[in-house]
Structure formats: structure tokens, C-alpha cells
Image (cartoon, rainbow, N blue to C red):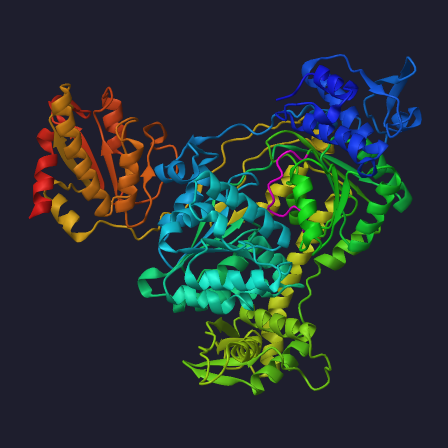
Amino acid sequence: MIAPLREFQALLLSVAPEAREISLGDPLLGRVQAAIQSLANRPDEIGPSDIAGLLRQAILRNHLALGEDSVLRVPKEPGWPTSQDWQEFACGAEMAGTQHFLVRPQPWTPAWLDKDAPSVVEAATRELVRRPSRLVRGDPLVFELAGIPNYVTPGQRAAVQAAFLLPRGSTAIISLPTGGGKTLSFQLPALAGLSQGGLTLVVVPTVALAKDQEDRFLALARLRNADNSQNWCPLAYHSGLDEEAKRRVRSAIRDGSVPIVFTSPEAIMGPLRGPLFDAARQGRLKLFAVDEAHVIAQWGQEFRPEFQSIAGLRDALLEACPTAEQFRTLLMTATLTPDCYETLQFLFGRGNCQLISELSLRPEPGFLLSLAAHEPERIARIMEGIRYLPRPLILYTTLRGPAEEWYDRLHGAGFRRLRMVRGGDLSDEEGEAILRDWRRGAIDIIVATSAFGLGMDQAEVRSVIHACLPETIDRYYQEVGRGGRDGNAAAALLVSTPKDEATAKGLAHQQIISVDRGFERWEAMWVRREPIGNGSSVVSLDARPVDIPDTGPRNVSWNLRTLVLMARTGLITIVPHLPPLMEPEQDEDIARFELRRKEILKKFSKEVAVRILDSRHSDKVHWDKVVAQTRATLRRGDERAQALVQELCNLKRPLNEIFRETYTLSDPPVHLPRMMGSCPITRRNGTVSFAAAEPELTLLAKTNLTLSAPFERALSPCLDEGGRCWVAYDGIPSDPRDFRRWHENFISLLRHAVAGGVVELSVPDGTLSPKEWSQLIMRSASNFILRASQSEEGSRAAWQVPRLTLLGAQPLTTGIVEQAMIVHRPYHIIVVPRSQSDPLAPHRRLLDVRRHLSIEDILARLQV
């Protein structure tokens, strides 16, 4: 909701602004309120540039959105912008008495952008709605546990359903756009498992994302009134926790007192590995999720190869589980390139991997691109953009050094509602304060390297600026996607220089170990191997060629890269490797045992179990040949990615066409709907458009769900060749007592059906109460029921699961009956009035020519 300008005016001229009650329904009004309160109470936390930027945005937004006069009376007091300050923000400042200015902002029309670029800034300032609503009705468990009546998209529905219905032990790659609601797919299973001691593990790439996910889950748990949520240990396990907090998390994983844990690949490969195996052996590890899974491909080859090694740990955890209690794996990403898809399938698939995809191009960002001749020109242009673009705003750099320089530059220019975030900066108390202030609107500008914002749901970011050339289109698209998550327009400004191409190319060039060095490292590891049976051996990541003095983390990292490269090549496969079982020795005190246990686990964390796939793995000529081929394939991928990035410096086709090319998959075929968007090319050609076809939902319907033998036998006399089971009833009585008896019989049928393997129910609204839905969910082996919508029949991809449809509790037309008849499922139980006519031959009754049983017949057969 956009507040009228008089609310801003009253706020600015209030005698005691810190005491005013201002509605925060308008986030921008809330930002202005926070800024004015800072000026009154904590003047060192705000600068004149902060005030000028916010008020310029507020005046222009109300002028554009509400047609109000674009002028605001502001105080002329210490701490407020001076006349010169207002001029730097392209605002006229006329004297209004001795104590005030009348401020009137001018539109921004930079000569260094295309002539229609102001339309992008105006749309972002006005907060134009870009993303159409695609709500679909939620399933019963979603409403019961999360209080959410609708899914935000059909893709979110498919993701949540996959978390419950995937075959145990299998994997789903879930690729939904930013804001598509992937998070609910691991939140809901964690909430559902609260009373059973189940554990959901979520692997995330950054401390910031772990903390953000922790906060969001706790808010959802409190909304559900989780009885003991106040007593949980920290849900985010990271380096910023003290030792006691870390111990509590490990203990909670072991004893089942924590429903969900957010952590890093390094933690699950190290201190959390033992507790996770304990949970797996007990059958309590229910879901293994990797959020922002594309980093497995992007970072696993570079400075954090643990991202690719977690697949081996996941396999080991699966083997540790009881056969009937294997967990499901979800790999979630908003961007899925062909190379990333291939990597995820290779590492996690093993022939048992499904893709759930509903990708579309982001309609929110409008793209502004500029090539500066040199660094001083870039600085001038970006400073101009920061003054005129709407807040909140993220400024991205590639390297830490430029981020620090930009922070100092903006601070010196009078910006104080400003923070800097580089890799690792959010792991301590200061980092937590930054996240809190960012979420509550106390920060307007973040200067950051690429990890900031990854997966974090800050909805109203209005501008994203790049003072660099990202090394890949994928990184650029992800970072631009951190603007406009609320579905409203955002501005994306990129200013590059000719020197940026060399930096981007160097970063895009994957740090894959050389063929010669790789073979030497492999020899050093293999010669010291320890056989563990089943044709497998353990190699130590501490091993090294004799001429390499490094014995620290860098050596371990390069050895791990060597193994990952060999696995991709097909020389070896990384196999499960269980940690040793450790118990205190006789007369060994706890402190001594803990010290010994830590030393053993430290050694174990640097061991990898491998199985040889190619007997010529120790033949250097063969090794060189096959590894060189894999390296060449990866290099070609780098070159393709680099060519796309270079187009940003000299755009000749619509930018969205580059994005479509980046994210199109061939097998399975995934094509993003074409949308022209707003970029320099579409604006020049007059083809700006944000309309697009409905995105395709890719849903592979492999669930292994079927009917139980007793329920299948009970239905067998009414099963036709099309997999439909016809169940008759005499109509829904109008007499209350007769209706109650009929309803009890129908509910009894549903209970048997759900307990017998029926997963999908299609019943008219109002047929079942929330309590009855809840009781049915408790009877389901999947702990989940799909609620089908008759209005969507035939218009969407569907899980191939046993289904029951009730016809006749609403005005029943032949069209509704015919629609139900063509729904294909492995088993489809159709409950229909005996008097219903046949849509194919209206002169006869539907059941006259079909084998059927009554509800009472089936209930009786189930009692036998």
C-alpha cells in the first residue's frame, strides 16, 4: 500500500517524530520514519545523503503512482540536507520561510544510458506490479501446519508434494524461479515430523542464508504454536556459534530434540558427521535438502570442493538408514543451466533422480547497461545511479578490495544507512546485527560480494547495481534476481569497463587441477590407501607428492579436487564411508574420551572412500588422455559462458534471449516461455513487454505409491480395464439423520482408502471439515494428501498416484462426469450416484454398463 504524501509531510514536520504512530503498511514510509528517528536520537547513524535519497524516492513515487504534486516541505536544520546536498540529488530546494525548504525532484535522464532508460527507473520507483498472481489452492497439511490456504504457484505445490511423495532414497532437483516458494518444501516436512523426532537437514552455502532460514522457520513454528520451540537449540550451525551452542546442536541431532538444522558442507563433512550418522541409523533423518544447489557446480570446482563431496556423504547416510526409513533428497535452485543439471544428476542421480521445474524469466527487473571508458568514469556513473535509484539497493562487486573501496567512498559521500558484506562477514554478532537491520528497514544500501543475498527473501529490494562484470551470466541473473522479489518492478544497473573482461574471464576459468599434478596427487593418495572391502579403499586427503611442502587445508582442497575430477572422468566413484564407532574405554574420563574422539574424527574428516571404475587409473598415459578430455569439456563450457558474459558489454540482442539460452535444457526438454522484458535493445526496438505464456510444469510422476493388497482385493470386482473403480451410492440424503449416516459411511470409506494407499482426493468444497482432513492425513503412510481441484483437471501435470473422486455433492453435469472419467491414474476410485446418466450415451445410466460396488459393499469386503 502506497501512503499519500501527506503522511510523509506529517512525519517530517512532527515536533516529536520518535513518538508518532506511523503505519508500516508502506515499507518506504517505514524507512523514512526510521531515518527521522535516527536523526533525532542517533544522529551519527544517518547522513544527509540518506535523507535526500529516501525523500527524493518518496516524492517521485507518489507523483508517479498517485498523481500528487511532486513537492515536499522539509526542515532546514542541522543534520538535514543543505541546498547543495539537494542539488546533488537533482532536487530543487526553494526557501520556505527561514526554517524549511520546498523540495521538488527532477527526473533522472542520464546521457550515458539509452534515451528510454528513465522508464525503468520510473517503474521501479513507482513499484509497478510485474508478476501476476498464480495462486493455487493448498493441500490440507499446508493449511494445518503453516496456516497457508494457497500455494504461491503450481511449481511450489509440486515441490512440497515431492518432499512427501518421492520414493524413499531418491532425489528431486527442484528448479523454481526466485520467489517461487521452494523453502516451504523443507519447512513443511520438518513441521510434520515434530512429534516423531524426525530431522530435516538443509545444507546452505552461506552463514547469512543459514541464519535467515533459521529465523523464517522459527517464525513459522511459533505461528503453529510448536510447544517446545522456545527450548530448541540453535537451528543454524555455523562458525559464529560458541562451543557450548555447537555441542547443544550435536546433542540435539543425536537425541531427536531438533526438527531441522541449517548448516554448511564443511560442517556436515566435519563436526556434524557423527551425529548425522546416529540420526540416520535410528531412521530419524527424513529429508536431506541442499538450498541454492547450483553452487555445487559453481563452487565445487573452485574454492569449496566440499560442495561436490557431500554427494558421497549423502550416499553413506542413505546406506546407514534402515531400509524402510531412507530419507528423500531435494536439490533446490532458481537457476539451472545444462552444466549444472548434468553435475547434479551425476553426483546425486544414480538413475533415481527426478526434475521438477517451472521456470520463467523474471518480469521485475529492467536492465540498464553502460560501458565506461575507464574506472573514474565508472565511479562517476555509479555514484549518480546510487543517488537517483530507489531504495533499498544492493551494490555488487566481484572482489573484496573494490567492495571496501565502494563502502569508504559512499560513507565519505554522506551515506550512513549503509553496510558492507563480504564472504564470511555475517558469521559473528556484527553480521547478525546487519541482517536484522537489513530486514527491518534500517539499512538502505548494502555493498557486497556475490554471496550476499543468496536465497534470502528480502522482498522489496528496488535496485541492484553491478560495479563489475560478473564472471557468468548465471551469477549476473541470480544477483539481479535479488531485486523485486515482491513481484514489483526493480532497476538493474551494470556499469563495466574494458578491464573487467579480464577479471571475469579469470574467475570463470575453473580451477581444475592440471593433468600432471593431478596424476602425481592421485599416486600419492593411492599408494597409501587402506582397503575396506567390497573393492573399495580409503585414501587420505593429507597425502601429497614429495615436492609439495604444503600440508594444510590448501593441500587437502587440491586432493579433493583431484578426486572430484577423476569421478567426473569415470576413473573412480566416491562411495559411502562410515565414521568409526567410538565408546569410552574402561576408566577413561569424559574429557579424555572427547579429546580422543575429536582426534579420530579429525583424521576421518580427511578420508574419502573410492572404488576403481577403470583399471588403468594408474597408467599415466591413459590418465592423461581421459582426464584431458574431461578438462576440455569443462573448458568449452567456460568459453561458452564467457562469450555470453561478453555480450553484456556490447548488447546486440534482447537480454532475455541470452537468459533463455543459458537456462534451456535439452534432456528433459525445458524451455522458458519467451518474454521480451526491458533492456536497451527492446527499448530501442519498441518491443518492451512483460507478457509471457504460462510456464511449463515439468513433473516426473515416479512415486512407487500403490494400493495395499487388502484394499486392492476389496476393489477388484469394480475395477475396469482403464484402472477405474466404480463405487455407487443412492444420492446424498436431505434428511439430517440420513445425511449423517451417509456421511459416516463415506468418511469410513475415505479412511480405508487413505490407509490403503490412496493419496489424492477430489471432493467438493465443504465435504470434509478441517478436523476430518487432519484425521485422514494421520492415516496416510505418506503423511500427506493431495487435494485435487476439479477446475484444474487436465490443465496441469499430475502425480501418478491412487486417487478417489466424489461426484454428486455439487450440481452434477455430464461435463463434470466426463472430466472425471478421463483423469488417468494408476487407480482411480470414482464414487458416483446410481442415477447418473452416461455422458457417452445419455439414454442409459452410467453404472448400467460398468462393474461397480456400493460404499457398503466395499466396507463389508474390508471387514472380511
Image location (x, y in percent) of residue 336 = 56, 49
Q: Is residue 823 visible?
A: no
Image location (x, y in percent) of residue 21 = 66, 23
* Image quarter in which the N terminus is found: top right
Q: Is residue 795 left or right of residue 622?
A: left
Q: Is residue 566 magenta?
A: no
Image location (x, y in percent) of residue 343 = 54, 59
Of 214 and 463, the residue lying toward us: 214
Which residue corresponds to the image point at 33% horizontal and 34% vertical from the top-left? 788
Q: Is residue 129 left or right of residue 837?
A: right
Q: Is residue 835 left or right of residue 31?
A: left
Q: Is residue 454 magenta?
A: yes
Q: Where 815 sits versus 716, above or below?
A: above
The region drawn magenta spans: 451-461
The image quadrant of residue 723 is: top left
Of 65 and 636, the residue lying toward us: 65
Which residue corresponds to the image point at 79% horizontal and 44% vertical from the top-left? 467
